[in-house]
Amino acid sequence: MQLYHYLFLFSLLLKPFYIFSSGGLQIADLFFILSFVLYVVLAGKKAKITIHKTDKWLLYFVILVFGINLVYFLLYGRFEFLKASLYYIYNFLTVLFFRIYSEDERFLVNVGKVCKLNIVIQLGIYGLNIGRYYAETRYMGTFNDPNQMAFFIFMSLITAFIISKIERGKLHVLYHIMAVGLIFLTSSTGIFLGIGVFYAVSTALAIRKLTKRSHNVMAILSITALLMLGLMFSSQITDYVKGFSESSIMDRVEQKLDRLNESTIGPTNIQDRGIDRLVIYPEKIIYGAGEGYHGRFDRSYSMNEVHSTLLSILFYYGIIPTLLFLFWCYQNIRILTVNNLAVVLALLAESLTLLNQRQPLFWMVFLTLNILYQQELAAKKALQNETILASEQWDTPFSSNNLMGISEK
């Protein structure tokens, strides 16, 4: 590996440490940028820097994002529109160079190791009681916001999970336990939903695989029965259930469910997340509202930004850029398989309620999914070639015998 690889890895290791306020550059970002610059200086002379054909769709998306925000900057004279564009340019560079760097398998393996290390470090910080709290019941560690921490831990977990699949291995169960525990402490309902979908789909796929054999079905039923009996006769199960039901995360889940009821006093989930703007200002879905100056949407319940990844892109930039973004996502994922289904559905679920597109790890997950897809595709082609070769070897002696028989006659 080269120095720019290590700088990228070091920046990923520093990413959880928020020294300055959210929305601006952090120490980790400086190492990201230094990695890009160093690659251009050192490797640029030896190899031409090219944009992968898949990432050209993302480039078109970013160009339109910049153009739309530039128009609104000229209209309102507010620099927050240009700042929003910088996030997309920065993350496009992350995609461009991460794809290049990932051609070195050692780099990709080390990305997985750093993701696992980040989970361990955050657990250590919590254990040492030196992390920060957003409120008495919402832990946020070294981050400025509990949702930031929950998202980072979740993305670290699934990135390490995907890379372990690429290595044809399994992510150790301890990392799953640590990540879920840390996310539980943040009381982030959006990430809690993503985690729930991830493990529900993973469990369903595992059961489906096991039930293909009759003796496995009997084993599953027996283990389930034993677990249920153990829970029923456990003297502490009532305390565990009571403790979980009174936890901060369950209080927040109940609040979100109550907001589904229109008769409930206060904002609905759609209003609270700013999603009501898509209904109140439907024309913005066509040509985009620009990302900034949220106070101009005075008919919306919330004056904050739209808290939903896909819906925010649709509202701020309109139909065409959104389709370009979705096509880029499709080009990376391609097909849903046993190895990626849980990740894709979990990412979709949590993205409905959270704003992810400013975080580099969000974009990196799609690239690791693409590497996994390319590996599966190569394995499938290799198997097909082996099958064709085997069939040719089987047919050849038969054909030669026939020819010999004809010549003897």
Image: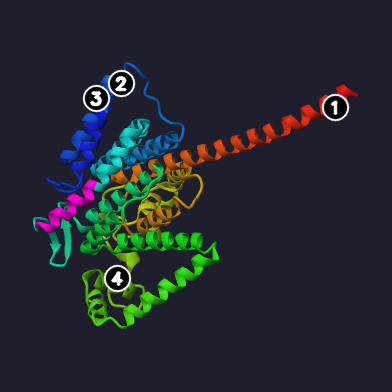
Asked whether, in this view, residue 371 is left or right of residue 237, the answer is right
Badge 2 density bin: few <14, some 14–19, many ≥20, Cα 10 Å: some
Name the outermost residue toward the right: 409
The answer to whether residue 261 of the structure is visible from this angle is: no
Going by the numbered disc 1, the residue's amino acid type is Gly
- Where is residue 325? Give x, y as percent: 43, 44
- Where is residue 200? Give x, y as percent: 41, 63
Q: Earlier in the sequence, mark 4 or mark 2?
A: 2
Asked whether, in this view, residue 77 is left or right of residue 395, the answer is left
Question: Does dot 4 land on a helix, a strand or a loop?
Answer: helix
- Where is residue 344? Give x, y as percent: 42, 52
Determine the residue positioned at 87% across, 23% down: 408
Q: Is residue 399 magenta?
A: no
Determine the residue positioned at 24% across, 61% down: 181
The span from disc 2 to disc 3 (Cα, nearest Å) is 8 Å
Which residue is the site of mark 4?
A: 253
The span from disc 4 to disc 2 (Cα, nearest Å) is 50 Å
Residue 38's label in the rendered image is: 3
Which residue is the site of mark 2?
A: 43
Question: Does dot 1 land on a helix, a strand or a loop?
Answer: helix
